[in-house]
Amino acid sequence: MKPIYVTQPTLPPLEEFIPYLEKIWDNKILTNGGTFHQQLEQALCDYLGVKHLALFTNGTIALITALQALRITGEVITTPYSFVATAHSLLWNGIKPVFVDIDPVTLNLDPNKIEAAITPQTTAIMPVHCYGYPCDVARIQQIADNYNLKVIYDAAHAFGVKDKNGGLLNHGDLSVLSFHATKVFNTFEGGAIVCPDEKTKRRIDHLKNFGFVDEVTVVAAGINGKMSEINAAFGLLQLKGIEEALEKRKFIDARYRESFENVTGIHCADTGSHVANYAYFPIFVERNRDALYEKLKTNGIFGRRYFYPLISDFPMYRGLPSASPANLPVARKISNEVICLPMYSALEENEQNRIIKLIKEFA
């Protein structure tokens, strides 16, 4: 019985990728904003409904650069319920993370808790669209405007997600995407920053290329964050099949929800009116979460307690006053109950049936 993992990248047929590789070999441009890099930036702008987008080697470098681009310092309010890269990007910039609890329904930063965490040192808010579920962008922007704060969205999970006003990625000062192999859309490794205007994109492009403007001019202490031509070519090919992949994920999501609707002690995330991209499928186990996690693993099903532990529990953060467990009761409860089940477009019906059967037996 083959193992089933929580995510699995969608791979196009190898023969479809070979022509892209041949073009790279022919023109001998491997990086530094080559043809495929430029084509993917434009294609993603068109698909996502954004005006400007800068490709990166991965989402973490993109987060670090986004903070640099907006010259963020001091303290930044963020969530403890995320992947560690969210908070790590702050530490790498010498910024102090200030953790705020999450909303029990959306699992995103709770707008009702943000204002109490603002100090004279606060310069920005970094929310996360967790599992691709949209944050309350209107409330967060209102708070940011009232206190003259920047907003950088960690949108690693939110590729293609829309809200009632259209593309979710147009909110805030910047939005950062991840194209890691486990994501809905991937380039093996990769990421991007969605920019509001050409001037901001130009600064970000300088920062991701060591600060170079031209051959002899360096204007900032930049980093090497450029995406290679091979990754960009793979992204162009992946983008062709994204709609089909999303439809398959939607079907898998619906089957999970229907199957667990009346199962005692197992709850699915309440997406409500959210227009998600079915990036993940978290369930919340009222009792003995770890026992179910181990039962699935014993049967070759490798779910993930995503996110457990909380970022605020790791050694580099737990000494912060905002990391106190008393400050984060909702995030702690969710973290102790969550298991993300296998969710990817190639998940076969019999595999999903086996997952559902094991969970029902446990419940």
Image (cartoon, rainbow, N blue to C red):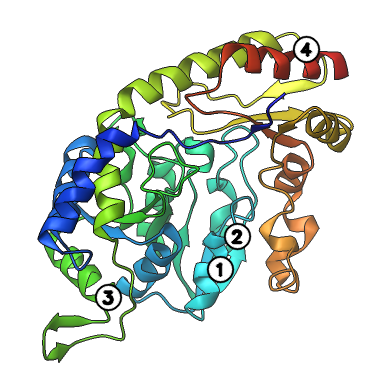
Task: Give whichever of discs 2 and 3 has the lower sequence position.
Answer: 2
* Of callouts 4 and 1, the N-terminal one: 1
Calculate the distance from the C-alpha at mark 4 to the C-alpha at mark 1: 38 Å
Residue type at numbered disc 2: Val
- Disc 2 vs disc 3: Cβ atoms closer than 8 Å? no
Give how far apart the Cα atoms at labels 2 and 1 are: 6 Å
Please state if 21 lies on the left or on the right of 325 as rendered. Answer: left
Say what amino acid the circle numbered 1 marks.
His
> What secondary structure is found at the residue carrying circle 2?
loop
Give me the C-alpha separation between circle 1 and circle 3. Answer: 19 Å
Task: State the mark number for residue 84.
Answer: 2
Q: Residue 207 carries which label?
A: 3
Seen from this angle, which residue lies furthest bottom? 216
Q: Residue 88, labelled with which disc? A: 1
Residue of label 4: 263
- SS label for mark 3: helix
Q: Nearer the viewer, residue 147 or 24?
A: 24
| Between 1 and 263, the one nearer to me in the picture | 1
* Residue 53 placement (x, y as % from top left): 22, 54
Amino acid residing under circle 4? Val
The relative height of residue 214 versus residue 243 in the rendered view (above or below) is below
Distance Cα–Cα, label 2 vs label 3 = 23 Å
